[in-house]
């Protein structure tokens, strides 16, 4: 078996058939399609029946548990993921005048990438994707910041790649070598925000060799005006990323700078968790963060080494003052700073990578 395609599904039967059909269209590759029904109100098996795929049903537990179940059952030499409301791009893409640099068709995407991974012995290959805003219908081709081979010890693997769409934020624009995941027991943790980024971070922490191609993998659909993520989930997701950065700094001398990135990530995570909330609710979110020992340790790092991480020069003093106030447990003052920053134009729509890029 060449590749296992894992599709988690929760109440998405209306778009699931399109996703499955886009995988079935892949040519010259031996594949299995594993649909993991995450406790949908109407079981997937009752609305879709075929010998071309397997349906596994689990109690509703979230996308991480669904993907883990698929990994347990996967028989392919390689694995990839696809969300039920997205699909592989079936033909040569042309969106807003941007097309495949290779001119290849996606019907041979899996075949081409797998043969490349076998030849070059890569553990992960990452591609680009099309993003469609369902509220406006606008489509955009999202290109990675990285090109070619990437290893963690390479200084060019900037931490901003972990926060930039098209790089390490998602899993459905990647193909993974299954033996690498098994060797390091890599599975999805039960976090509710940025579980993809966490998974990819831990892959790199385990020494994965990755390659970035300009091939377009999938069309990703989102609706920005639906489904605000809970503040606790956002904060937990950023804090988990901070913990991985900390591990990078402790285990590899060439990643010492990640110690500072961990601290900055913690601070930005708290801001994004509180973004858009009334000042009183911001204070509640901040109060919860003050009870987290790891977070408070990261604030110590920020107060000792305010220039140690990459971030926009104009924001350094704001982040430093915020860290000092957090160490003083002055939640009310921090809530005021966050409110002021939002009035100046910062919001959850800002990419953390854009805020953290060095501005010399």
Image: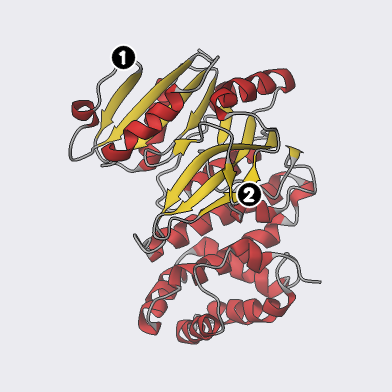
| Color style of the picture | secondary structure
On the rendered structure, is 56 left or right of 102? left
Query: In the rendered image, which residue does mark 2 sit on?
Result: 97
Query: In the rendered image, which residue does mark 1 sit on?
Result: 51
When the figure is inspected, residue 243 is found, relative to residue 123, above or below; the finding is below
Residue drawn at (69%, 62%) of the image: 260
The C terminus - image quarter: bottom right
Residue 114 position in % (x across, y down):
62, 21
Q: Residues within 10 Å of mark 2 (few under 14, many from 20)?
A: few
Residue 16 position in % (x across, y down):
33, 35
* Residue nearer the viewer, 162 or 182: 162
When the figure is inspected, residue 44 is found, relative to residue 64, above or below; the finding is above
Q: How far apart are the alpha carbons under marks 2 and 1?
A: 39 Å
Residue drawn at (29%, 26%) of the image: 56
| Mark drawn on residue 297 | none
What is the secondary structure assignment of the residue under circle 2? loop
Residue 89 position in % (x across, y down):
51, 35
Look at discs 2 and 1 and give the one toward the viewer: 2
């Amino acid at each position: 078996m060449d590749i296992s395609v894992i599709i988690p599904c929760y109440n998405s039967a209306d778009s699931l058939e399109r996703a499955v059909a886009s995988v079935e269209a892949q040519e010259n590759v031996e594949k299995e399609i594993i649909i993991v029904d995450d406790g949908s109100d109407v079981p997937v098996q009752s609305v879709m029946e075929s010998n071309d795929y397997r349906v596994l049903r689990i109690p509703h537990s979230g996308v991480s548990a669904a993907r883990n179940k698929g990994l347990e059952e996967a028989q392919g030499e390689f694995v990839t993921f696809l969300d039920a409301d997205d699909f592989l791009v079936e033909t040569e893409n042309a969106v807003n005048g941007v097309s495949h640099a290779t001119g290849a068709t996606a019907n041979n995407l899996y075949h081409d990438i797998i043969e490349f991974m076998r030849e070059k012995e890569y553990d992960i290959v990452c591609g680009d994707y099309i993003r469609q805003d369902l509220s406006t219908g606008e489509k955009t081709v999202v290109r990675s910041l990285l090109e070619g081979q990437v290893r963690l010890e390479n200084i060019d693997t900037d931490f901003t790649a972990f926060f930039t769409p098209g790089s390490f934020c998602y899993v459905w624009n990647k193909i993974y070598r299954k033996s690498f995941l098994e060797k390091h027991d890599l599975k999805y943790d039960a976090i509710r925000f940025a579980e993809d980024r966490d998974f990819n971070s831990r892959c790199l922490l385990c020494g994965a060799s990755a390659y970035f191609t300009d091939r377009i993998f999938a069309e990703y659909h989102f609706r920005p005006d639906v489904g605000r993520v809970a503040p606790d989930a956002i904060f937990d997701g950023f804090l988990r990323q901070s913990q991985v950065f900390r591990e990078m700094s402790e285990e590899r001398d060439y990643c010492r700078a990640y110690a500072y990135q961990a601290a900055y990530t913690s601070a930005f995570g708290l801001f994004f968790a509180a973004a858009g909330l009334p000042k009183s609710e911001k204070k509640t979110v901040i109060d919860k963060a003050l009870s987290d020992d790891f977070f408070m340790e990261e604030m110590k790092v920020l107060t000792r080494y305010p220039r140690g991480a990459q971030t926009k020069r104009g924001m350094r003093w704001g982040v430093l003052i915020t860290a000092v106030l957090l160490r003083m447990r002055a939640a009310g003052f921090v809530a005021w700073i966050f409110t002021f920053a939002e009035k100046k134009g910062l919001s959850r729509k800002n990419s953390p990578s854009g805020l953290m890029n060095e501005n010399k």
